[in-house]
Amino acid sequence: MNTLRSYLVHVVTVGVIVTLLLSLVLYWARFACKSVLGGITPLANRRAQVQPCGLLPLSLETQPAVVVPSRVMVDVHPEETVPLNEHTDLWLIGVQPLEDEKRLYTYFDPAIGKIVQCKIYQEEDEDGESNGLWINEPQLFVGPEGISVIDSDETGRFVEPRAVFDGKEDLIILDTKLRRLFRVNLAARQVVEAPAESLAEMGAPVAAGRISKNPNLLSMQWTPPLREATEQERRTRQDEIVPGNFIPAVPLSINAGEYVLVLDNAGRLHKLNRQTLQWAGQTGYLPTAPEFAMSRDEMARPYDLPAWIAVSVSFDPNNTYLGALVATLSPDGTGATVAVFDADGEMVASDMTMATRVRRRFERENGPRVRDLSDAEADTGYGKQLPGGSGARAGGPLDDDTVARARTINTYFEMPGGPALTGLRYLLENLQPPVFSVASYFTAPYISPEKGQRNLLLLPHSFAGSLGRKYQEDRFQRLAVLAMTMSPSLLIAAVLTMAVRRQARTIGLSDRSIKYWTAAILTFGLPAFLTWRFTRPTHTLVTCANCGRGRRPDMEKCHHCGSAWEVPELLAPAWRVFDDHAASSGASVPSTVSTSLQVAEEQPKDDNPQAQTTDAQPSA
Amino acid sequence: MWTLIKREIDDSRAFFITGAAYTISIIVFVISNVYSGGLSSKSMSGWPILPMLVWAMVLFSGMGAKQMYMDKTRRISCFLSTLAVTRSAIFTARVITGVLLIVMTLLPVTAAWIIILKVVMPPIPLYQAMFVAGVRTVLLLSLASYSLGLLTGWAPGRVVPVLGGTTLALILIPLVILKGSGMETAVILVLVTAVSLIRSRQHFISTPL
């Protein structure tokens, strides 16, 4: 029993280490494949853009001075990975430089549950040099119930606040746990809370104010209509000059209009009055981005996407809200979509990353997404006319056929080396334990993409995981797709199982042990096989006298043929040695021979039963 | 037990000296940086943190492998088992010595880091939380590397005991790059340490004299 328990501990401990280390090695191999694929993908296939963006009236986009119409553009950055430390976003809200190298830090202190604003600087000695000691001067403590200059219980506690600066003095604070939204004016020390009926109009809020998640994975660039800057403007409005010596022809601004955007957990964007936080309507949604294996033009949930950005665009003179620009990255991080929503929340233009041949076909049928509006066709047949007929003709939403063909697999398969790298990645995924592939398939929709990208065992972004997200309706279809996706993994497991069974039989493992190992290798695949190689019992086999195959010396019977050991019986031989000289002393032996050997021929031939038994051993 | 630990320390004094040299070299490196170019978060971003980590893990896994390999080749535990000492006690003393090396090597470095961060980083909870998580991860990674060294040090042959532990530790280090210093990493490292120690102990105490 002790031996069995000891062997079990041996197998389990080695199995855990092998599984973890092999998963690490496989992860980096897959990562290398993905990075190379991302690196060789041309920028054109990683970019989605719309020009003109469709939010401005045609008269503004086609002014004689305008050289470049408005444009919104998103780029996927496959070389980037999801940031590791979530505390950075949650806890550090902003740093503002002050005079004398002092800085004003605004951060969340989880110990006291408040957002703290502190003046922090290093103490200086008499010579004016820093002596390395930090001085921390708290200025304000912000809680859900108010603001104070000291840490007071009366101001309440935040639990999980997500705060962003909205201008220099204002904070938009969304506590996702408390489900409360605030606008805080730090200068006036005012706290405005969103009315409960405003929040009742939406699902659980996910982000408010600056709607952005992992901007290093997906970048958005937006430019208003541009004209050439005059010499005087180059000197006086340097911060507005864009490369090429252009300057905005129309005073537009982002995230500064009359509304604050709020994203709810269903992926819908809402606009709230900036001052009162009253709900003012829905203004768009997060569109689905093309994935490796599929592309669906539906609304995506924020939880399902690794990166998203949404900005509001307003017309500067009177801060009129024009609409929202929204970009999303697909769960597997391979494709992106950009969409433009007008003030009423209707999508007026969209584009997504797609393969070159898909883009060519689309543009042949629908015209390009990027137009300079320099010719007459700008006003004819290009996309859809905006409501009211006052807006510039934008590209309009993509048609279903294009969306269906915008899968990033098409991009990878048209690049040199793309199919080989994709195949290698698929093979590496199939070296994972089959049980984890099955788990990835079924749990993919429930694992957040950020965590999924760094997972070792459950791989929601694997081929199995992607298909698991796609096929969720029909149970039999799901199982069939799963079996097809995992077929290489199952094949590898079957081959390894056969090898282990053969080896186990050779060394004489019991049928029960062979069954356990078979189940383990079918479940855990390569890690279980490596565990078997490291932990299998070692026996020096001897040749079976009956069947001629190796048999274990510690077993009663041969594990191949079942024959017992043939122990040679130690019987006296039939022959004798006589010493003639000694015998002669008895005077009964002839004296002509001094010493001789005399075999007792008179013994019967069947005197040695062992020899006869051996000869007569049945071959069975 | 105390005698056993002293004996283990005496046997592994080369590793303790190397650990001390490693610690001193890091502190000298930090001080020289402070005096040459000042201390700032910008200058610290160029410090070779990863090579420092790799050398520390090589040291700790080498210590574990050496303890077991020397025992196997010189049959030290076989001899000690003839006295009033069990192999379980020998193994415990060995692990305590390994942990002692890790603590003695990392403690001064951690103290130096605390001083540096107090000088460089503003006193806000974010940086303190990141530092605590970083120290916890390095400590657990060190324990895991040492345990893997113990595990491979008893293996037959010469190549696996000498290089196996270091190789496995080097495979494990990218886990920190992959998953950061969060609780998930801590759980994985604790798991690796636990199973390695269980297997090493079981193998060690069940080996015939």
Image (cartoon, grey):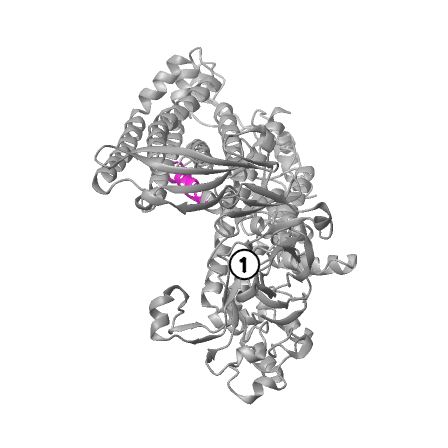
Q: Is A189 left, or right, of A119 in this rendering?
A: right
**Foreground residue, B208 or A388?**
A388
Q: Looking at the picture, how far across and down is residue A277, in whole percent?
A: 64, 51
Which residue does the numbered mark 1 point to in the structure image? A256
Residue A294 seen by the camera: yes
Q: How far from the left and from the top, in percent, is residue A590?
A: 46, 22
Query: Magenta: predominant secondary structure element?
Result: helix
- The magenta span reads B160-174
Where the C terminus of chain A falls, by quadrant? top right
Estimate the x, y position of residue A345 in percent, counting from the top left. Answer: 67, 65
Q: Residue at x 64, y 39 (%)?
A: A615
Pick out the residue farthest to the top: B84
Residue B172 lies within the magenta run: yes
Which residue type does callout 1 highlight?
Ala
Residue at position x 49%, y 64% from top?
A: A37
Query: Along the line of sight, which residue is nearer the eye, A450 or A130?
Result: A130
Q: Which residue is found at the position 63% from the left and 29% from the top?
A: A607
Q: Secondary structure at mark 1?
A: loop
Give the chain of mark 1.
A
Does the magenta segment cover residue A344?
no
Residue located 51% across and 81% down the image: A63
Label 1 Cα crowd, 10 Å radius (few <14 / some 14-19 / many 20+): many
Q: At which x and y percent is residue A119?
A: 41, 38
Residue B129 or residue A252, whichever sits in front: A252
In the orientation shown, which residue stands out farthest toward the bottom?
A376
Could one spot residue B145 in this view of the protein?
A: no
Q: Image check: B63 left or right of A63?
A: left
